[in-house]
Amino acid sequence: MELVVVTMSFDASDPVRMLGLLSKYAVLARGHAGCRNVDLLASATKPGTYLVISKWESPEHQRVHFDSADLVELAEGCRGVLAAPPRIDLYDAISAHDLN
């Protein structure tokens, strides 16, 4: 299996709204085909900074997800909520394991 890891980092100008959007997204994304895991984290050193880490079974699953209505809804919801553009990166897993 090819595991693809996606990180999305958000600096919120409205942390309450951003957290609501990201919480909903994380729950919905976990149900997408090929999703192994989605974690939502809040920075301990930068208030209002959030990180989403998702793991996908294959690059194809990740690409389909990026075109999904749930990710589009998140992107549209971010208007007026972000202090800066989100930072999105893709990683090939060297060592990644999900506990069942």
Image (cartoon, rainbow, N blue to C red):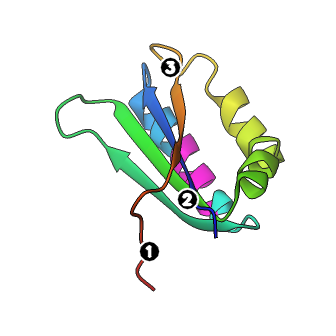
Q: Amino acid at mark 3?
A: Leu
Q: Is 80 left or right of 16, judged from the image as shown?
A: right
Q: Amino acid at mark 1?
A: Asp
Q: Residue furthest left?
A: 45
Residue drawn at x 40%, y 31% is: 15
Q: Which residue lies under the disc numbered 3? A: 82
Rendered location of residue 39, percent (x, y) = 45, 57
Q: Which residue lies under the disc numbered 2? A: 55
Residue drawn at x 40%, y 81% is: 99
Vertical side of 86 occupied by 44: above or below? below
Which label is found at residue 98?
Answer: 1
Q: Residue furthest bottom?
A: 100
Q: Earlier in the sequence, mark 3 or mark 1?
A: 3
Rendered location of residue 23, percent (x, y) = 52, 52
| Residue stretch rendered in magenta on the structure | 21-27
CB under 8 Å between discs 1 and 2: yes
Could you classify mark 1 by the number of other residues whose Cα lies within 10 Å: few (under 14), some (14-19), or many (20 or more)?
few
- Mark 1 to mark 2 CA distance (whole Å): 9 Å
Residue drawn at x 39%, y 37% is: 50
Could you classify mark 3 by the number of other residues whose Cα lies within 10 Å: few (under 14), some (14-19), or many (20 or more)?
some
Q: Is 93 left or right of 46, judged from the image as shown?
A: right
Of the pair 5 and 2, the residue shown nearer to us:
2
